[in-house]
Image: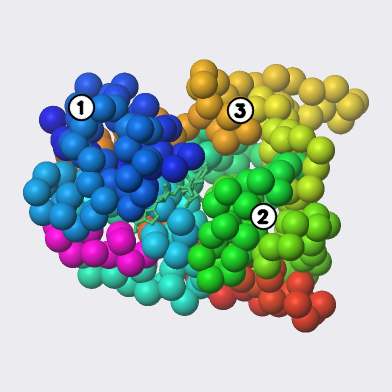
Amino acid sequence: MKRAAVIGLGDISSIHIMAIDKNPEITLAAVCDIDGTAREHAPKDVPFYTDFREMIEREKPDAVHICLPHYLHVPVSEEAAGRGVHVFCEKPVALNTQEAEAFAAFEASHPEIHMGICLQNRYNESVEMLKGLIDSGEYGQVTGTRGIVPWAREKSYYDVKPWRGKWETAGGGCMINQSVHTLDLLYHLGGPVTAVKASVSQLLDYGIEVEDTVSARLTYANGARGLFLATNANYRNESVQISVQMEKAEFSIIDNVLYRLNSDGGRERLVEDEKLPGTKFYYGASHGKLINQFYREIETGGSDYIHVSDAVMSIRLIDAIQKSGRSGETVQVIPE
Ligand SMILES: NC(=O)c1ccc[n+]([C@@H]2O[C@H](COP(=O)([O-])OP(=O)(O)OC[C@H]3O[C@@H](n4cnc5c(N)ncnc54)[C@H](O)[C@@H]3O)[C@@H](O)[C@H]2O)c1
């Protein structure tokens, strides 16, 4: 039985607590939030702390789940890992490329500690099947990708948690916070991206610092073209759409269903993502799958989960898109 602890009891923490609760091999040993009122978001019989260091010292968890504002991901992860605790950290892996690369170097220098990053959509059934189809080689090379994230965030989303609208604490807006998953998948499915050209803007008049809308053209190492569109300015949250064109076939994930697109305009349904009752449909339902996998790998000493190093490319892409948005120029992406 592994002992888990959750640091940060805000919006996402309930999904982690639910996944821990459902896994008979893990017990929730303790929870922590600097805000004492947040204890009501965790089961009453679980010890609550306001200081994560004290919690680790007293409760000796095997792993901590980091559900904190972005600027705390790396320092708290490294401090927990330094105390011998495995770390499962929410996305994004870091605020920027420099911090992400330093975190990946830290991971490499601590091989005894598992550090997993919660880019759970890689574990959606639709994405797993599409990745398998691409890797099989049956359909030839990827020639094009498209990712669309048509989401909506009210002003209150930023007013209630001001860290979300600030560069210093969030590291950006709709890319690093909402559509980092989709950028990660465009890389996971399409391969290395070498250059981007982008437009980065604010369509919402919320008075926040960070972007709410982005369009970007991606150039892949093999010459394939990608298009990425993301916004928080839609009138409602709609499912993310991801399309991949290959030499011999085209596939799209629409409303959490993977389709093969036929040349006559029809489409063949291949697989549908599992739905997780009680969670937002547009998050993806794979938090639990990834968390279970992470703990299995802790138990067996395996390494099949999403590492810090796996998540660095999503931050390199975001930084390159931001830079292109500022300069109006095509920007090279740092290679893997
Ligand atoms: N994987 C996903 O699909 C997904 C979805 C939503 C959010 N997230 C991520 O989850 C993380 C948290 O987001 P959220 O929306 O739940 O944020 P939130 O603001 O609702 O919650 C953060 C919590 O951390 C607490 N906190 C701040 N500093 C602390 C400290 N030093 N020690 C202990 N607690 C502290 C705050 O009091 C707050 O309760 C972010 O990284 C976000 O990007 C991931």
> Which of marks 3 and 2 precedes in the sequence?
2
Which residue position is annotated with label 1?
45
Is 81 covered by the magenta stretch? yes
Q: Nearer the viewer, mark 3 or mark 1?
A: 1
Is 15 left or right of 145, judged from the image as shown?
left
Work out whether residue 111 can be spotted: no
Is 190 left or right of 230, judged from the image as shown?
left
As drawn, the label of residue 174 is 2
For badge 1, the amino acid type reads Asp
Q: Position of residue 233 (x, y in %)?
A: 79, 48
Q: Residues within 10 Å of mark 1 (few under 14, many from 20)?
A: few
Does the numbered disc 1 mark a residue whose Cβ is under 8 Å from ligand 1?
A: no
Q: Residue at x 61, y 28 (%)?
A: 281
Above or below, comparing residue 200 to residue 114 in the picture = below
Q: Position of residue 92 (x, y in %)?
A: 49, 56
Q: Which quadrant would the N terminus be assigned to in this image?
A: top left
Above or below, comparing residue 128 to residue 59 in the picture = above
As drawn, the label of residue 281 is 3
User: Start and end of the magenta stretch?
Assistant: 74-84
Q: Position of residue 191 (x, y in %)?
A: 59, 56
Q: Residue at x 86, y 30 (%)?
A: 263
Q: Nearer the viewer, mark 1 or mark 2?
A: 1
For badge 2, the amino acid type reads Cys
